[in-house]
Image (tube, grey):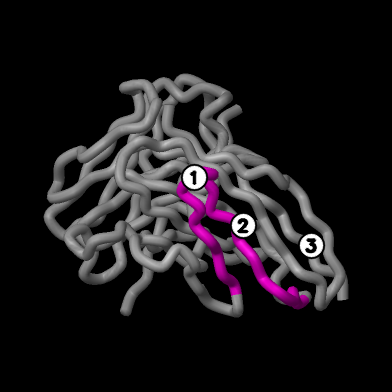
Amino acid sequence: AQSVSQHNHHVILSEAASLELGCNYSYGGTVNLFWYVQYPGQHLQLLLKYFSGDPLVKGIKGFEAEFIKSKFSFNLRKPSVQWSDTAEYFCACPPQGGYFGSGTKLNVKP
Amino acid sequence: ETGVTQSPTHLIKTRGQQVTLRCSSQSGHNTVSWYQQALGQGPQFIFQYYREEENGRGNFPPRFSGLQFPNYSSELNVNALELDDSALYLCASSLRGQGLNEQYFGPGTRLTVT
């Protein structure tokens, strides 16, 4: 069955700490992968996406993710988090509407 | 450019009733997807509409139905409401034919079934 799983449900970091959020997918077709972010009180918005080519993709606000096909993973990273990165992060994999992970709540302490 | 809008913002219904939720796509988008997001979970795909036809469906019963109109706006209808239908309902629009289905989400409608 197609699915997306996120391992970390709640992460607490101090500012300037490095971040890595795990995402694994199970899908047999062409893989397009996304990370979405939902800041408090705001809509879900796209953070970055992988379509093809370079497996290391860069998104907004200094985030990046690496597609590792052999591990079925698409982990999100940021070298140094800021308080403003406090949000919920969702990994997603199409087709069509897409399959979302359960989300990771990131709380960055100032 | 106008973003995705949804109405109403909040809604309270009684078990067994029917509800209609509405979504206006972002300008220029031709595809609409609906999601159900229960508390503490990620969005669950309900269905997608493209050119006024259903273009894929998740694991939801037939009492969840939808429409897409010529202006690409959309409705989600839920019949015979159950308590478990209480959730945030998200609409997302995209432009099919641009390769990736990069979706733009609305603010959602919070449905409470009592």
Give x and y (percent) for residue A34. 46, 57
Q: CA distance from mark 3 to mark 2?
A: 11 Å
**Which label was assigned to residue A13?**
none
Give x and y (percent) for residue B71. 16, 60
- Residue A43 visible in this rendered orientation of the protein: yes
Magenta range: A63-82
The residue tagged 2 is A89
Closest to the observer, B79 or B52: B52
Q: Earlier in the sequence, mark 3 or mark 2?
A: 2
**Which label was assigned to residue A70?**
1
For mark 1, does the 10 Å Cα neighbourhood hold few (<14), some (14 to 19), or many (20 or more) residues?
A: few
Q: CA distance from mark 1 to mark 2?
A: 23 Å
For mark 2, does the 10 Å Cα neighbourhood hold few (<14), some (14 to 19), or many (20 or more) residues?
A: many
Q: Is residue A65 left or right of residue B23?
A: right
Give x and y (percent) for residue B98. 21, 65
**Which label was assigned to residue A107?**
3
Q: Residue at x 46, y 36 (%)?
A: A26
Single out the mark in the foreground, 3 or 1.
Answer: 1
Q: Is residue A15 left or right of residue A70?
A: right
Query: Which quarter of the figure is the C terminus of chain B placed in?
Result: top right
Q: Residue at x 25, y 71 (%)?
A: B27
Instruction: Please name the amino acid that badge 2 sits on.
Output: Tyr
| Helix, strand or loop under label 2 | strand
Q: Residue at x 62, y 48 (%)?
A: A103
Find residue B72 and report its image quarter: bottom left
Q: Where is B62 relative to B110, above or below?
A: above
| Residue A70 lies within the magenta run | yes
